[in-house]
Image (tube, coloured by chain):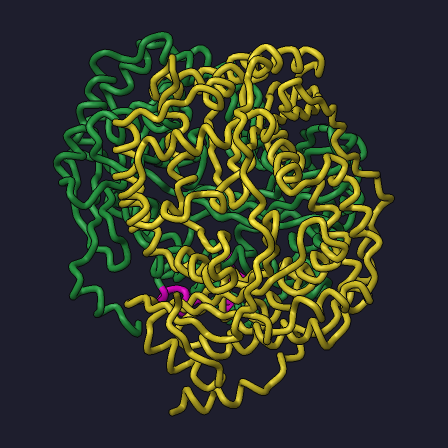
Chain colours: A yellow, B green
């Protein structure tokens, strides 16, 4: 009873004063120095006769080169009776080509100084590798072999399926995994974006031929991009690319089709995922956000930073720095080609499940009702511009970011224009974006935890308490 | 590199590839030195370094660094605690001011202590108690492998100890360990060394010197027999095995060969353990590990450390099957050594990994500051790629034969709890 009474009281109490107080800067703190313009990477753009797009960034200095190779078509393009097949493809694309076995591939990449990472996204499959520049041509040779000649040997696929089945069981013991999987189903319904992972059924049903089929459909030069960033001369690198990819031909079949925009309006409800023995409740709130190329994308990014994207943001100051409910609350925008999401997440101890959700809903709505202060706005804008330069310090990060832009249908100059657009955002822009994307009533709420704890704690909110899909 | 009159050491490295900088302030205080009855205190204290000072109350630090376009963080490890920031160069002066300010004094507030105690306990819940495997390979394995408190205790902290921490403990800890003479500040980026030295002089030189604290007593009695135990896991669906071998000191002539052995066994899909356990015998789902893993590189420690292997394996495979395949892989390395080609390949990979790390200013600052903290010199950071190239096949073979023996190891097998037992965890 005591718990319930406390919950009801808290439901209508505003956040405590400290978290909303404007930070006063010390008198003798030196001011920021003059800005030095952050130069966007200079990208040489080329297209081979077979349609392969090539983006090259020559950056002498450290003796490293990073390659990113993207093809259109990811989880959203998988056959509907094989959800998550792209993940199995990512796990097995480096397990054999016409001339090399899995161990030889791993050894050749290691001899170049790199590890291959294969990331299947919703809209693409991205292969990345960073190597010593002295071995860049060796790495490029292996990369072209993987993208053109992978054979998905039966024995390797059988092993990968067995391990994927156990790994999925293990992932299901992690609350963030099950929360994210449920959120995608709630937000996207039947739209292909609802798939975040393979299922035991799809793993078991998948065959080497399934993999060979989607590989043949998607790995084609006219639907692919190769990015190289690092210590090389662009002309020489382009020659090296041509000699390894130039003879590659696209099939006459039609490429992967655009998944189209999702049409679901998520119910503002709480979806419970029981996790026996859990000492925390994982709260995830999800709503739709802007597309990456939308007019209000940058305004929504600024709003997200003010709301929950930094240590000094409203949500973090409130439920971490003021109340100590959680260690790592955060808000983030996720973007796919045909949809954007705004996600809030916090792992909170069982006893504060209700007050934590109350504060998250409150801070979402406060974005809608209360314009940012000048200080909040300036801080968020400077943060987003600065952090982009920081994140692009590594060649591998530049390479992968360029590949992600290409998947979103953008050009390399999007890196430079993003900063300029952010710097121009006004308080009114933030308000408009916040009104559109941040109302708490637009969110679906997933709660993973001890079932009785979660249901008892969240019943007073008066929202439908559903079992998660 | 320069030393101020109060004992603070400054290291600068220029990198003009972007108008940004990374800074790392490392203090010579880590898990090994936290007092008995106060497990987890070094890390709890680290959180309090972000909670403000009399000059710059709580909230100012994040506002200054994030408003300057940067990010900040802290890490507590066995032999150091580091505070790191990275930002566009325009934020350099305010960031230096902030670091100097919290080297002078803190806001010793009980309210902030209580708040961060809650935050740290949530951190332990999210990373340990509520997490399958609960980092047992990092927390429980040293607990079994070592005999003395500095090396064996739970560094994340027992909740009773965290709850017992008082503001007086915070003050005493700060007084003793957070002294300029016990700190190294490294700055990497679009800077000019002379300019940095004068700025650091300006902001830090007025901090009075204090006695330099003692180094930890971290000697361990020699291990004579294999140590084995098992644990039950209420959350994991698959079993895991953690194996730790005691390593020689970082300055011993064997140490570099040890680092190479750790990577030969664990680094990527070409590694011996991946090939033997995941591919060859097919008795494991994944293999991770290395020397001083997972809380540091094989080159950054100043006391006893382990070569740890963390193996996740399928429920239908037995512990003995995994260990059998593991022992065969180690025996092969000890008896036959690597081929010269195998060795060249892993050294190339290690050099590539090192350059990939040093490329990022904040990471280079971190590496430089740790090296100076441990050795009063950063030469090792830049010499490492060359030194690794000198390791021979014979050294690798000899290292494996000498150190990778069962009497030098500790094993914990962690298995999913039976279904009925899992329900008991409810409502903790």
Choose between A351 and B168: the one closer to the eye.
A351
Choose between A195 and B149: the one closer to the eye.
A195
Task: Give the image quarter of residue B236.
Answer: bottom left
Left or right, B134 with respect to A367, comes to left
* Quarter of the image that includes the C terminus of chain A: bottom left
Where in the figure is residue A262, as x and y percent of width and height? 57, 58
SS assignment for the magenta stretch, majority? helix
Residue at 66% x, 66% y: name it.
A437
Where in the figure is residue A397, as x and y percent of width and height? 61, 35
Q: Is residue A252 above or below residue A160?
A: above
Choose between A100 and B17: the one closer to the eye.
A100
Task: Give the image quarter of residue B78.
Answer: top left
Left or right, A301 with respect to B256, comes to right
Residue farthest toward the right in the current orientation of the protein: A34
Where in the figure is residue B367, as x and y percent of width and height? 56, 33
Q: Is residue A458 above or below residue B428?
A: below
Choose between A206 and A402: the one closer to the eye.
A206
Residue at 59% x, 49% y: name it.
A336
Left or right, A146 with respect to A273, comes to right
Residue at 61% x, 45% y: name it.
B84
Q: Which residues are magenta?
A: B159-173
Q: Is residue A138 visible?
A: yes
Residue at 52% x, 39% y: name it.
A73
């Amino acid at each position: 009873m005591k718990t319930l009474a406390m919950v009801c009281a808290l439901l209508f109490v505003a956040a405590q004063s400290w978290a909303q107080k404007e930070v006063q800067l010390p008198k003798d703190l030196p001011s920021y120095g003059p800005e030095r313009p952050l130069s966007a990477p200079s990208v040489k753009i080329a297209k081979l006769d077979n349609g392969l797009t090539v983006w090259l960034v020559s950056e002498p200095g450290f003796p490293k080169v990073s390659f990113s190779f993207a093809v259109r078509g990811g989880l959203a393009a998988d056959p509907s009776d094989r959800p998550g097949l792209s993940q199995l493809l990512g796990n097995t694309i480096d397990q054999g080509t016409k001339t090399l076995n899995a161990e030889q591939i791993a050894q050749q990449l290691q001899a170049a100084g790199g590890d291959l990472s294969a990331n299947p996204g919703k809209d693409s499959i991205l292969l990345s590798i960073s190597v010593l520049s002295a071995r860049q041509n060796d790495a490029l040779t292996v990369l072209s072999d993987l993208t053109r000649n992978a054979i998905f040997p039966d024995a390797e696929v059988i092993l990968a399926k067995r391990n994927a089945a156990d790994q999925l069981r293990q992932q299901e013991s992690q609350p963030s995994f099950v929360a994210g999987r449920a959120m995608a189903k709630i937000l996207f319904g039947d739209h292909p974006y609802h798939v975040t992972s393979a299922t035991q059924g799809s793993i078991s049903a998948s065959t080497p031929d399934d993999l060979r089929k989607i590989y043949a459909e998607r790995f084609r030069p006219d639907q692919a991009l190769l990015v190289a960033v690092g210590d090389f001369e662009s002309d020489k690198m382009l020659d090296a690319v041509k000699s390894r990819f130039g003879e590659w031909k696209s099939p006459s079949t039609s490429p992967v089709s655009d998944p189209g925009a999702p049409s679901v309006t998520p119910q503002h409800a709480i979806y419970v995922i029981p996790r026996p023995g859990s000492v925390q409740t994982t709260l995830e709130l999800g709503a739709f956000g802007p597309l990456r190329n939308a007019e209000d994308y940058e305004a929504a990014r600024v709003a997200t930073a003010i709301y929950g994207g930094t240590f000094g943001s409203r949500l973090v100051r409130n439920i971490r720095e003021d109340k100590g409910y959680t260690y790592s609350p955060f808000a983030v925008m996720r973007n796919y080609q045909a949809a954007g999401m705004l996600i809030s997440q916090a792992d909170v101890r069982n006893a504060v499940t209700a007050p934590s959700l109350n504060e998250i809903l409150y801070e979402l709505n406060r974005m809608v009702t209360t314009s940012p202060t000048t200080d909040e706005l300036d801080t968020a804008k400077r943060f987003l511009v600065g952090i982009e330069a920081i994140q692009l310090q590594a060649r591998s990060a530049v390479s992968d970011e360029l590949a992600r832009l290409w998947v979103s249908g953008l050009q390399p100059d999007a890196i430079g224009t993003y900063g300029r657009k952010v710097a121009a955002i006004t308080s009114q822009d933030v308000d408009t974006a916040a009104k559109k994307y941040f109302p708490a009533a637009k969110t679906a709420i997933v709660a993973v935890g001890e079932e009785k704890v979660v249901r008892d704690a969240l019943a007073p909110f008066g929202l439908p308490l559903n079992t998660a899909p | 590199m320069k030393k101020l009159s109060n004992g603070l050491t400054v290291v600068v490295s220029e990198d003009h590839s972007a108008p940004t900088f990374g800074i790392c302030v490392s203090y010579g205080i880590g898990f090994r030195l936290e007092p008995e009855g106060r497990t987890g205190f070094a890390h709890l204290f680290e959180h309090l370094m972000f909670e403000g000072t009399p000059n710059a109350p709580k909230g100012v630090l994040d506002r200054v660094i994030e408003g300057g376009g940067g990010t900040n963080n802290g890490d507590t490890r066995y032999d150091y605690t580091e505070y790191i920031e990275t930002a566009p160069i325009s934020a350099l002066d305010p960031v230096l001011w902030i670091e100097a300010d919290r080297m002078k004094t803190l806001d010793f507030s009980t309210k902030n202590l209580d708040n961060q105690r809650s935050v740290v306990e949530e951190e332990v819940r999210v990373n340990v108690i509520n997490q399958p495997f609960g980092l047992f390979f990092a927390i429980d394995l040293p607990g079994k492998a070592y005999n003395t408190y500095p090396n064996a205790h739970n560094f994340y902290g027992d909740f009773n100890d965290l709850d017992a921490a008082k503001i007086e403990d915070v003050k005493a800890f700060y007084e003793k360990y957070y002294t300029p003479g016990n700190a190294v500040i490294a700055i990497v980026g679009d800077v000019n060394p002379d300019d940095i030295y004068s700025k650091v002089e300006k902001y830090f030189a007025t901090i009075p010197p204090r006695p330099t604290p003692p180094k930890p007593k971290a000697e361990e009695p020699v291990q004579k027999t294999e140590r084995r135990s098992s644990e039950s896991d209420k959350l994991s669906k698959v079993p895991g095995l953690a194996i730790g071998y005691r390593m020689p000191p970082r300055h011993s002539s064997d140490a570099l060969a040890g680092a190479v052995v750790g990577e030969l066994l664990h680094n990527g899909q070409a590694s011996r353990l991946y090939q033997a356990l995941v591919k060859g015998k097919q008795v494991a789902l994944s293999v991770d590990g290395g020397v001083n893993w997972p809380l540091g590189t094989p080159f950054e420690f100043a006391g006893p450390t382990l070569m740890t292997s963390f193996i996740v394996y399928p429920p239908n495979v037995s512990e003995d099957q995994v260990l059998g395949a593991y022992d065969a892989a180690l025996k092969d390395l000890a008896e036959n050594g690597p081929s010269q080609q195998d060795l060249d390949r892993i050294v190339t990979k290690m050099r590539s990994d090192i350059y990939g790390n040093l490329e990022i200013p904040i990471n280079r600052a971190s590496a430089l500051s740790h090296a100076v903290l441990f050795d009063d010199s950063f030469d090792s950071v830049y010499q490492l790629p060359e030194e690794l190239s000198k390791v021979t096949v014979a050294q690798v073979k000899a290292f494996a034969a000498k150190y990778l023996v069962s009497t030098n190891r500790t094993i914990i097998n962690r298995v999913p709890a039976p279904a009925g037992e899992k329900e008991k965890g409810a409502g903790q």
